[in-house]
Image (spheres, grey):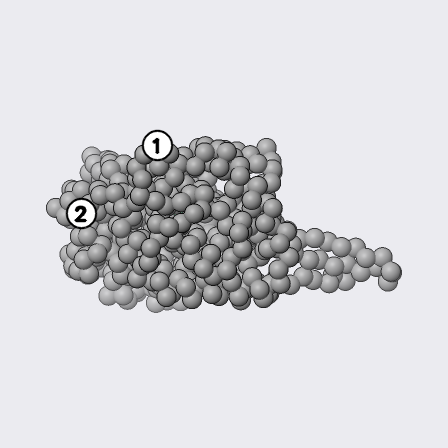
């Protein structure tokens, strides 16, 4: 598939001259493409075009919008290999993970194609015989979507799916490390029949584009996925125009192993959750809390699984451990490991840059991790598993709930009463119970506390892109 022939605002191309910026392959450092550095003026034009297109798209029958999204889901599935190859080239994750991400994106569009026709209103019982109360949902308007680099296809799909289904138009700013996947999705949107102006993609400087998107009163909703620090900044920038906000921010997931857990399953899923995309996922476990009674048995199984990981180029089918996205990500991981070791953690595995090259870091295991270490309070966003053991689950709950983050966590155990009580007591938006794959399109994804506002996915996901209108009808 030739993705280079795009004519969107943030078009991909092959030039390296002024006004264009290269996109690098994190595995090799080679340039995989160039994208335009859109100006503030480009951003303003994109908002204007989305604003103009809104009435037409919102006025389409929900079935018609759903049909476009269903065609889009089909095109994404049809072009899985092209999209996955592009995703791996600019993001670095193993092809198998890229294919799974593309499938997840198709799933979001397919789900919201259905939801488009289920935005139902309500007739509320009126206190008076001579009046009726109707409540309807209307699309909120122009949506600004800003996305991160770690899931460059599915994070875009999670926003576009519900926004387009609801009848909104979208101006999308993807992450600079991974803009090509977003542009490829936009090309497929055109092929699916999305009308002109309904989706605009802006590549370029975040602060320049972000200033326009957060300050322009024609943008009704900012839907952001990224770090808590950037989310906080954008929250402030949106105050002047009182935008609706959806914030999917950072996390610090605990992985709790209770004494009666199925240890084979817990260890296998712990490794899968921790090392997917080299630990660069918002829901990946940052800390492991393992009960004293099973600590050694769990660790043995965990190490066996970790030793099977193969760092390598994502295009090699044997590779299971991705590179980190860039040098800054690597430096953060090194800082976390050095800090933990300096404060008394035991380095059981790894702890160095991996021989695979460039930005790979070894699968690393730290034991005896204490509350005062950086790994215990900040997102590491790398292949580092920080383990500690516990006797009383109350200590674990206190530690987890003291965090500023509240995105996701995992509880493994067989005593359903203890497992459920533990999961319910955690201040987290999502908990996997003997399970790890939380990112399902029919479920509400999102966090509490400084992990964000609102939910993406599920029926509530589309309502976030709507405003209620209350109609009092006198008879
Ligand atoms: P990030 O640095 O916050 O960047 C996210 C996006 O925001 C990028 O497109 C970035 O562009 C843009 N941005 C930064 N400053 C901006 C500004 N002033 N105005 C407008 N846009 C701005 O996050 P990241 O490193 O890409 O992604 C990793 C983070 O995302 C982690 O914290 C992870 O937990 C979180 N995440 C959360 C979820 C979730 O569902 N809760 C899912 C995935 C990732 P530039 O890079 O050009 O600055």
Lateral position of residue 455 relative to residue 26, left or right = right
Vertical order, 331 against 261 (above or below): above
Q: Position of residue 219 (x, y in %)?
A: 57, 42
Vertical order, 135 against 47 (above or below): below
Q: Position of residue 429 (x, y in %)?
A: 46, 53
Q: Residue at x 21, y 56 (%)?
A: 315
Question: Where, by quadrant of the figure, is residue 126 drawn?
Answer: bottom right
Say whether residue 38 is visible: yes
Q: Are marks 2 and 1 in contact (CB under 8 Å)?
A: no
Q: Classify the position of the C terminus by image quarter.
A: bottom right
In front: label 2 or label 1: 1
Q: Classify the position of the N terminus by image quarter.
A: bottom left
Vertical order, 213 against 191 (above or below): above
The secondary structure type at the circle numbered 1 is loop
The residue tagged 2 is 362
Numbered tag placed on residue 165 in the rendering: none
Q: Residue at x 60, y 46 (%)?
A: 52
Say whether residue 408 is visible: no
Q: Residue at x 60, y 50 (%)?
A: 54
Numbered tag placed on residue 18 in the rendering: 1
Mark 1 nearby-residue class (10 Å; few <14, some 14–19, many ≥20): few
Viewer-nearest residue: 458 or 67: 67
Lateral position of residue 128 relative to residue 396, left or right = right
Mark 2 nearby-residue class (10 Å; few <14, some 14–19, many ≥20): many
Viewer-nearest residue: 17 or 328: 17
The secondary structure type at the circle numbered 2 is loop
Q: Position of residue 115 (x, y in %)?
A: 55, 64
Q: Residue at x 27, y 50 (%)?
A: 89
């Amino acid at each position: 598939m030739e993705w280079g022939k795009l004519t969107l605002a943030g078009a991909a191309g092959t030039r390296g001259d002024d006004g264009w910026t290269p996109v690098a392959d994190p595995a090799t450092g080679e340039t995989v493409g160039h994208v335009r550095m859109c100006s503030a003026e480009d951003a303003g034009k994109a908002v204007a075009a989305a604003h103009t297109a809104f009435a037409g798209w919102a006025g389409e029958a929900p079935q018609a919008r759903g049909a476009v999204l269903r065609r889009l889901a089909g095109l994404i599935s049809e072009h899985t290999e092209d999209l996955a190859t592009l995703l791996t080239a600019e993001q670095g994750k193993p092809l198998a993970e890229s294919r799974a991400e593309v499938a997840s994106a198709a799933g979001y569009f397919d789900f919201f194609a259905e939801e488009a026709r289920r935005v139902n209103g309500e007739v509320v019982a009126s206190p008076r015989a001579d009046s009726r109360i109707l409540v309807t949902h209307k699309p909120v308007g122009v949506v600004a979507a800003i996305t991160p680099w770690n899931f460059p296809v599915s994070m875009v799909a999670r926003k576009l799916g519900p926004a387009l289904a609801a009848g909104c138009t979208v101006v999308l700013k993807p992450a600079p490390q991974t803009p090509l996947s977003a542009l490829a999705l936009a090309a497929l949107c055109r092929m699916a029949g999305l009308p002109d102006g309904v989706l605009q993609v802006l590549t370029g400087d975040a602060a320049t584009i972000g200033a326009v998107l957060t300050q322009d009163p024609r943008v009704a909703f900012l839907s952001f996925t990224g770090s808590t620090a950037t989310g906080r900044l954008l929250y402030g920038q949106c105050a002047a125009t009182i935008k609706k906000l959806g914030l999917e921010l950072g996390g610090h997931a605990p992985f709790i192993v209770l004494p009666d857990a199925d240890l084979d399953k817990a260890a296998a899923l712990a490794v899968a959750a921790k090392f997917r995309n080299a630990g660069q996922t918002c829901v990946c476990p940052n800390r492991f809390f393992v009960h004293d009674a099973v600590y050694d048995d769990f660790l043995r199984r965990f190490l066996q699984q970790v030793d099977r990981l193969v760092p390598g180029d994502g295009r090699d089918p044997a590779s299971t451990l991705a590179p980190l996205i860039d040098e800054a990500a690597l430096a953060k991981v090194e800082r976390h490991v050095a800090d933990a070791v300096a404060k008394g953690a035991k380095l059981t595995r790894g702890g160095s840059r991996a021989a695979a090259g460039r930005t790979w870091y070894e699968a690393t295991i730290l034991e005896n991790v204490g509350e005062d270490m950086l790994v215990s309070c900040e997102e590491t966003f790398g292949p580092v598993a920080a383990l500690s053991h516990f006797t009383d689950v109350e200590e674990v709950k206190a530690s987890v709930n003291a965090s500023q983050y509240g995105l996701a966590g995992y509880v493994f155990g067989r005593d359903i009463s203890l497992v459920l009580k533990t999961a319910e007591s955690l201040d987290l938006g999502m908990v996997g119970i003997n399970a790890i794959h939380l990112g399902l399109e029919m479920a509400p994804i999102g966090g509490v506390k400084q992990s964000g506002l609102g939910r993406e996915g599920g029926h509530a996901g589309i309502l976030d892109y709507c405003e209620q209108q209350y109609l009092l009808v006198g008879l």
